[in-house]
Image (spheres, rainbow, N blue to C red):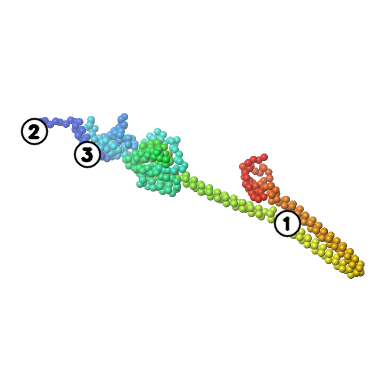
Amino acid sequence: MKSSLLESLFDEEERRPMTVSELNESVKKALEKGFSSVWLEGEIVNFISANSGHWYFTLHDGFSQLKAACYIRNNLRIRFKPFDGLQVRVRGKLSVYEPKGEYQILVESLEPVGEGALKVAFEQIKAKLAKEGLFDVELKRPLPYFPKRVGVVTSPNGAAFHDILNVLGRRTKTVHITLIPTRVQGETAGEEIEKAIKLANKFNEISDEKIDVLIVGRGGGSSEDLWAFNEERVARAIRNSKIPVISAVGHEIDWTIADFVADVRAATPSAAAEIVAENEENLENFLFQRTNDLFQIVNYKILQARNSLQELAYSSVFHEFPNQIKDWKYEIEDFQDRMETVFEEKLRQSEKCLELLRNRLSPIKLAAKVSENQTRLALLKQRQLSAIKDVIDGQDEKLKIKMASLDALSPLSVLKRGYSIVESENGKILHNIDQVKIDENVKIRLANGNLKAKILEKK
């Protein structure tokens, strides 16, 4: 050591010392080269948000501490605002703050550690957006009743997209699906989801086959897996979308910021597809049910008309009257037979008496008497036949009168003269206008058929 000191005394050139700035610059370059990307985990203390937008804080692990700086160009990508006491995981590079000769980590990304930290970050973003009114009910748009094209913002390899395809393929026949592929977890997922939503809206501006509704979501996962849908940029993209948005993130119990800002929240991706297909399926079921009801009503009306016709066919008006005519006809024929029998018997008795008298009288007188009696008998026979004819004609005339009377009383004859029978819908015959109301349906029975009418006016 003494030798080195002596040698230095006799050096021809004295060594030039480094300045503090040069040393700090050299150390900075060495640190940035050797520690260009490091991951650290610790607790934030002494957090400061400068007016310039930069963040400054200290990372502490209970034994050691390290100063950290997160410049505005990086903290704009961080999804929450840090605070003292928050346990975080940071990625960045080591560097030296030359004016003070302090080494520090320049933070490029920052994430909370643990469910509690994620919940705090979630509540921060939720409160900020709620204060701005992004969750207001007045801003939520109704979904189209019959969407023709559905845009799906999700991963093409995830189960969510396949669930949506299966449900829509099974429950609807008219909906077309347009996939806007994106990552749904990871550091850049939020940025990609935002771009996908904007791309869908851009597609509507240049295409005639417009997207009617957007499903934005993914399948289940941990809070960290779902975090991209809590990012502020995603929430603002959903709210600024001109296309109505259905959020479908995770399982039924999972809630994200996207669920609060979306126009409709679905518990799962499958439930989102069910919402899209619901109206078409309901209309199809409604038409099917109404068709069945119509067939039932037609069958009932046919059965009702058949029963009415059968009741009319078996009505006493139609089967008792012909039977009565037949009875009268039989009575007249019987009366005619009995009269002919009586007259024939009288004629035989007269012929017997005549024969007896002929035997008693002389041939000449008898011949004269016979001739006279024959003349009288011919006259009587003529009168007899005339009387029989008069009786028969009289009875026939009475029969015609009775038949005409019965025919006049028959409902069919009345109908044939231009009259009709008006009945209410329950089959009751109407006698006055108080039995029916305006717009009420009635049935009109004519001689050759039935009519159905509606009452338009009463006088």
Residue 213 seen = no
Categorize mark 1 by other alpha carbons within 10 Å: few (<14), some (14-19), many (20+): some
According to the image, label 1 marks what residue? Answer: 325
Marks 3 and 1: in contact by CB < 8 Å? Answer: no
Q: Name the quadrant containing residue 219.
A: top left
Q: Position of residue 353 (x, y in %)?
A: 87, 67
Q: Position of residue 143 (x, y in %)?
A: 45, 40
> Which mark is first along the chain, 1 or 2?
2
116 left or right of 374 in image: left
Q: Residue at x 64, y 53 (%)?
A: 309
Q: Residue at x 71, y 56 (%)?
A: 322
> Which mark is first along the chain, 3 or 1?
3
Query: Which type of secondary structure does the marked residue at label 1 adopt?
Result: helix
Query: Which type of secondary structure does the marked residue at label 3 adopt?
Result: helix
85 left or right of 285 in image: left
373 left or right of 324 in image: right
Residue type indicated by callout 2: Glu
According to the image, label 3 marks what residue? Answer: 34
Residue type indicated by callout 3: Gly
Query: Which type of secondary structure does the marked residue at label 2 adopt?
Result: helix
Q: Name the quadrant containing residue 60.
A: top left
Instruction: Between residue 118 and residue 232, name the one nearer to us.
Output: 232
According to the image, label 2 marks what residue? Answer: 7
* Quadrant, the N terminus: top left
- The CA span between labels 1 and 3 is 129 Å
- The CA span between labels 2 and 1 is 164 Å
Instruction: Between residue 89 and residue 440, name the one nearer to us.
Output: 440
Q: Residue at x 43, y 49 (%)?
A: 170
Q: Is residue 6 above or below residue 404?
A: above
Task: Give the total number of marks visible in the rendering.
Answer: 3
Categorize mark 2 by other alpha carbons within 10 Å: few (<14), some (14-19), many (20+): few
